[in-house]
Image (cartoon, grey):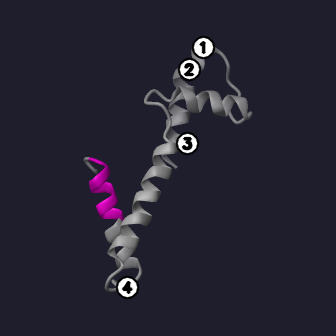
Amino acid sequence: MFRNKEDWISQRAYAIWEAEGRPYGSDAKNWRQAATEFEQLEMTKASSDGTDLIEMLRATGRLMRTCDDDARGDLKLARTIAKR
């Protein structure tokens, strides 16, 4: 697990470098790409309790349950979908 943004970016930049065949001099480009990917991932994060994802799924018709008794099931489903 990554402890902070810099750790994540560092690990991702390294993975990009390895995937490209470890070319010399591509560190800045790989770091920028990893930083961009991190920012994109941050923009797609759900709230910590998953309620925004549940509401989005309901609004798009992908989650049909509306009864409060099903809220725990909805949250479990939302977390499962968010992990994909």
Whether label 4 touches label 3, CB < 8 Å:
no
Give the residue number, with chain letter if any, for mark 1: 68
Cβ atoms under marks 2 and 1 closer than 8 Å: yes
Label 1 secondary element? helix
The residue under label 2 is: 71
Which mark is first along the chain, 3 or 4? 4
Highlighted range, magenta:
4-12
Q: Is residue 6 left or right of residue 59?
A: left
Seen from the viewer's position, the closer of residues 45 and 6 is 6
| Alpha-carbon span between mark 1 and mark 4 | 52 Å
In primary-sequence order, the first of circles 3 and 1 is: 1
Looking at numbered disc 4 in the image, what kind of residue is underneath it? Gly
- Name the residue tied to disc 4: 21
Q: Quadrant of residue 51?
A: top right
* Marks 4/3: CA–CA distance: 33 Å
Q: CA distance from mark 2 to mark 3?
A: 15 Å
Q: Earlier in the sequence, mark 4 or mark 2?
A: 4
Q: Is residue 22 magenta?
A: no
Q: Position of residue 40 (x, y in %)?
A: 50, 51
Label 4 Cα crowd, 10 Å radius (few <14 / some 14-19 / many 20+): few
Label at residue 81? 3
Q: Secondary structure at mark 4?
A: loop
Residue, x 41% and y 64% (percent of image)?
A: 32
Would residue 66 appear left or right of 53 to someone viewing this image? right
Which residue is at 52% across, 42% downward? Answer: 82
User: How much space separates mark 3 and mark 1, taking CA atoms?
Assistant: 20 Å
Which residue is farthest right?
Answer: 61
**What residue type is disc 1 on?**
Asp
Q: How many marks?
A: 4
Residue at the image position 44 percent from the left and 65 percent from the top: 33
Q: Circle 2 — which element?
A: helix
